[in-house]
Amino acid sequence: MLRRRIARSKQWRSRPLLCSALLILISGCQPLGLDTPFAAHVGETAPGPSAAFPGAPPKPPIVVDLQLHVPLKTLDTLNLVGLSRCAVQTTVGKHRSSLGRYAKPSQRLLIELEYLRLAPACINLLRENHSILSRSLNAIWRHKRQQLPALIFNATLASDEYRSFWLSTRPLGGYPPVSHALAVTALRHINQHICRWLNGDYQTHNLDFEVLLSEVAGGGAGTLMHAIRVQSNAPDSATSAIARLHMLLMPIKILETQLVRVLPKQYRLWMDDRNARVTAPALRQGERSLLICIL
């Protein structure tokens, strides 16, 4: 038991270092600009588009099939009057409302993060005179912290916004397209927030997070993949498109690595298919670029 505790403690302390390393990798190689063809980074000629991107890109899974079941730890039995001196009382009220019960994944994530941020102060405040309520709050807090990776997956990789990011054809009334640079920036900022949350910093800016998700939705990775396939007779254009796709894929791959333990089978199958048929050549180029950047 002691060895297990020590191992878990070491793993927890290593998380900030892993997050920092991953974020450095996606932000450290930018001096040539987001629209510079990737071959210019590495001094090599990119593989031909027909060889690099065989077949039609795989369609992303339907959102409802990807969403992980994350049961709500009931807060209905908590005494709201007993929480009157705690800021978390408002959060408990949100949980009990229709907003909490039927919220979209991103909104539910933000509510859970609010509880994780506010509950500890209330737990400490009530520990002496309301020990039962304090213990209940603490048990719920620990449960929600364990659920956090699954909640993050539902709000990002399994969301409508990230699925829209992969679609090659935009449905009518869908998310409006955004610039390549804006989409890359949004993906990186989301990863930075997630890195903080997984390491115990639960501060959020709710509106900013929703805006970032909408910017990801308009990022057009699926459109780029389609363009690469049809540009087989225009190597220069295809090489530029591959470079742009690479810039979008790197933060996606980093987020998938962060959440690897909760990725459901259907997502893994689609991810592996995507990597084998679509992203593997671009990612191999990216790894060589990162090595050159680091050296």
Image (cartoon, rainbow, N blue to C red):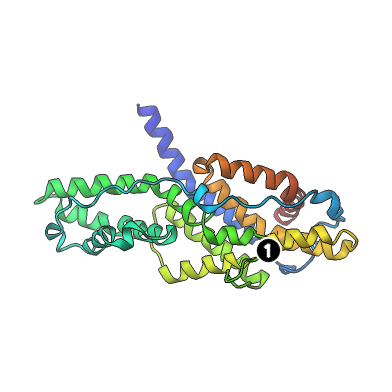
- Secondary structure at badge 1 equals loop
**Which residue is identified by label 1?**
169
Quick one: quadrant of the N terminus? Answer: top left
Q: Is residue 39 visible?
A: no
Left/right of residue 131 with respect to residue 34 in the rendered view:
left
- Location of residue 272 in the rendering, given as x and y in whole percent from the top left corner: 66, 42
Left/right of residue 272 with respect to residue 210 in the rendered view:
right
Q: Is residue 94 above or below residue 254?
A: below
Left/right of residue 281 with respect to residue 124 in the rendered view:
right
In this view, the residue farthest toward the right is 233
Left/right of residue 234 with respect to residue 215 in the rendered view:
right
The residue carrying pointer 1 sits among few (fewer than 14), some (14 to 19) or many (20 or more) residues within 10 Å by Cα, namely few
- Location of residue 46 in the rendering, given as x and y in whole percent from the top left corner: 84, 55
The image quarter containing residue 179 is bottom right
Residue at 53% from the left image edge and 52% from the top image edge: 19
- Considering depth in this image, is 32 or 158 the residue closer to the camera? 158
- Location of residue 66 in the rendering, given as x and y in whole percent from the top left corner: 52, 48
- Considering depth in this image, is 213 or 26 the residue closer to the camera? 213
Residue at 84% from the left image edge and 55% from the top image edge: 49
The image quarter containing residue 185 is bottom right
In this view, the residue farthest toward the left is 129
Q: Looking at the image, how many numbered discs can be counted on the residues? A: 1
Amino acid type, callout 1? Thr
Q: Is residue 255 visible?
A: yes
Residue at 60% from the left image edge and 73% from the top image edge: 176
